[in-house]
Image: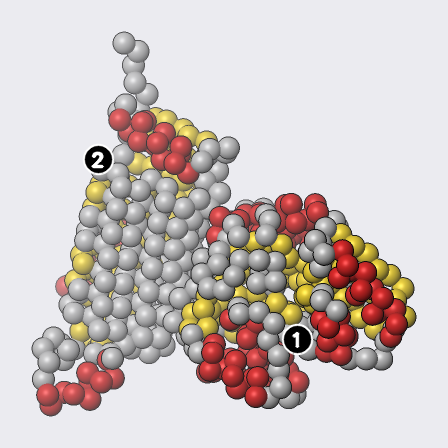
């Protein structure tokens, strides 16, 4: 199972409402993934540095060390702790990968580093996630989300979706399915110097796509390339600061439903999740087709 | 004894799926013949494994397996439906006045399943009888391994149509992206077109289209060494 959701506002003039829409969709998808829920959302852009989201859990020491490590190296205009999460705003010339490595070294589980990306995920229902981390009303115009029913790898906060495409700023992915050539591809990417931080196959999709983007492919080209190289069953959503893409495997083995009009795009594993965000708009949704790749810009 | 109402309305709001199905069964047990179900909200497994010939109308979108395993009821969905509409039914039918997900009418042995709009992948997979009518487009591997029965697609069909079908008839009104292993296109006979016209008129679908008839080429019925290449392709 697992539920995935994506929401994007096309109309730049409309007030941001993607965070609320995603939380409503994920709550509707709770039965597809009671283990955890999470979102990747895009707030105001920091051109002079990054927003970091990391997990210290119950180890307060890790939070203290992380803040110290950050302040030793960079200007830190804001540091906030909420229920096991550390959120840092930092001004720096360092790369997202360097920032993540520094914080990793002091024990923080770094979930996202981006100019605007923030990943928040936990072993709780989407409505509680929204409440706990104050996500309702978060000023994002697009984002992706996930409810997890684990069929491989551990059930904990780090193995929940979304996954950041470390070390590439602002790229995140959610996925319903399995990547069956995971171990082979992981070894290939490790030989290229990428490091993996969980045993979850979705992390591989994130790194795979980000590697292609880094080689100059467009979002659509990178996702299309994945159709030939990722083996298994998948419907996945991949987001960047500019927009997102959806892809469904060549055998159409995992679900995906789309609603699109002039104002919004909503994608979910099941249609009722789209209705949870938009109200019931009959007959305007359709299934993503086998091998179909679609991209949108926010 | 009070008179039993034959016309019952059930509102799903606030009810668990099991409670909805229990109420549907209870109403049928008391002699209801017309059920209206409000606010189904995409719930899965609604009105499954029922017999008799009641008419059950869902006002809104339903989830997976609506009306599955039925042996007679006529189910109407005024909305869209998720995966596996009417899977494995033996008789009766489901009519979706909207779009539906993948695996519509999987493995049915009888009955009539109609979707007015588009459907996802693998509609009529392993069809063992009965009739399936899709008004719009059908996705990847439609009619995969169908064994007998009739499938009508008003719009376009995706890749791999009728792959490894044994017998049965597929009629397509639109374009076929590609045929599956051992599926062949023929021109429909006047008699077949007559039956098609009758069927489509009865379900309120457009009749006049440039119909193509897809059937099994019969080359995969028995293994023959000389046809090894064909088998390799099918696998």
SS class of the residue under badge 2? loop
For residue A52, which numbered disc appears in the image?
none
x 63%, y 45%: residue: A127
The colour scheme used to paint the residues is: secondary structure
Quarter of the image containing the C terminus of chain A?
bottom right
Residue B77 image-quadrant placement: top left
Q: Residue at x 45, y 69 (%)?
A: A178
Q: Under tag 1, what secondary structure?
A: loop
Q: Residue at x 32, y 21 (%)?
A: B5
Question: Where A148 falls versus A91 (above or below)?
Answer: above
Chain identity of mark 2: B
Q: Residues within 10 Å of mark 2 (few under 14, many from 20)?
A: some
Residue drawn 10% across the image and 80% down it: B223
Q: Nearer the viewer, residue A51 or B210?
A: A51
Chain letter of the residue beneath label 1 in the structure image: A
How far apart marks 2 and 1 lie (CA) works out to: 58 Å
A250 relative to A140 in the view: left or right: left
Crowd tier of the residue under label 1, counting other residues whose Cα lies within 10 Å: few below 14, some 14–19, many 20 or above: many
Looking at the image, is mark 2 or mark 1 nearer the viewer? 1
Residue A188 visible in this rendered orientation of the protein: yes
Measured as percent of width and height from the top left, residue A117 is found at: 72, 66
Placement of A185 over or under A289, stated as above or below: below
Q: How many marks?
A: 2
**Vertical comparison of A255 with B32: above or below:** below
| x and y percentages locating residue B129 in the rendered image | 18, 56
Residue A15 visible in the displayed image:
no
Q: Do the CB atoms of the residues marked 2 and 1 lie less than 8 Å apart? A: no
Q: Is residue B11 above or below residue A48?
A: above
- The residue pinned by badge 1 equals A166
Q: Which residue is mark 2?
A: B52
């Amino acid at each position: 199972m697992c539920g995935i959701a994506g929401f994007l506002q096309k109309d730049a003039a409309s007030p941001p409402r993607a965070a609320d829409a995603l939380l409503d969709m994920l709550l509707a998808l709770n039965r597809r993934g009671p283990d955890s829920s999470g979102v990747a959302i895009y707030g105001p852009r920091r051109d002079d540095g990054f927003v970091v989201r990391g997990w210290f859990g119950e180890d307060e020491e890790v939070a203290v060390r992380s803040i110290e490590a950050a302040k030793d190296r960079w200007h830190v205009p804001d540091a906030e702790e909420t229920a096991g999460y550390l959120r840092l705003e930092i001004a720096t010339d360092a790369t997202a990968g360097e920032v993540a490595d520094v914080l990793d070294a002091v024990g923080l589980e770094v979930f996202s580093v981006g100019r605007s990306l923030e990943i928040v995920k936990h072993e709780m229902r989407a409505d509680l996630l929204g409440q706990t981390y104050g996500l309702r009303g978060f000023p994002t115009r697009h984002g992706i989300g996930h409810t997890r029913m684990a069929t491989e790898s551990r059930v904990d906060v780090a193995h929940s979706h979304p996954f950041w495409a470390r070390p590439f700023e602002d790229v995140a992915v959610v996925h319903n399915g399995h990547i069956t050539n995971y171990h082979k591809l992981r070894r290939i990417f490790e030989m290229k110097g990428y490091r993996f931080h969980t045993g979850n196959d979705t992390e591989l999709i994130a790194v795979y796509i980000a590697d292609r983007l880094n080689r100059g492919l467009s979002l659509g080209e990178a996702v299309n390339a994945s159709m030939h190289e990722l083996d298994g069953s998948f419907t996945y959503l991949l987001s960047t600061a500019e927009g997102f893409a959806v892809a469904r495997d060549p055998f159409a083995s995992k679900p995906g439903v789309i609603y699109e009009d002039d104002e919004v795009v909503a994608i979910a594993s099941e249609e009722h999740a789209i209705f949870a965000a938009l109200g019931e708009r009959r007959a305007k949704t359709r299934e993503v087709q086998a091998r179909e790749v679609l991209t949108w810009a926010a | 004894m009070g008179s039993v109402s034959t016309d019952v309305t059930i509102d799903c709001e606030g009810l668990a799926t099991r409670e909805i199905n229990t109420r549907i069964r209870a109403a049928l047990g008391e002699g209801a013949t017309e059920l209206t179900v409000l606010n189904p909200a995409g719930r899965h497994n609604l009105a499954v494994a029922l017999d008799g010939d009641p008419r059950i109308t869902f006002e809104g979108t339903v989830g997976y397996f609506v009306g599955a395993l039925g042996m007679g009821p006529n189910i109407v969905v005024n909305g869209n439906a998720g995966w596996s509409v009417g899977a494995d039914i033996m008789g009766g039918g489901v009519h979706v006045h909207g779009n539906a997900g993948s695996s519509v009418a999987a493995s049915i042995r009888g009955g009539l399943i109609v979707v007015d709009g588009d459907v996802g992948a693998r509609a009529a997979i392993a069809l063992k009888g009965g009739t399936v009518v899709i008004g719009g487009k059908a996705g990847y591997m439609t009619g995969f391994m169908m064994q007998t029965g009739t499938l009508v697609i008003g719009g376009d069909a995706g890749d791999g149509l009728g792959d490894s079908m044994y017998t049965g008839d597929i009629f397509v009104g639109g374009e076929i992206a590609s045929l599956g292993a051992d599926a062949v296109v023929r021109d429909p006979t006047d008699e077949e077109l007559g039956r098609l016209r009758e069927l489509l008129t009865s379900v309120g679908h457009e009749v006049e289209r440039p119909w193509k008839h897809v059937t099994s080429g019969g080359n995969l019925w028995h293994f023959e060494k000389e046809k090894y290449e064909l088998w390799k392709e099918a696998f």
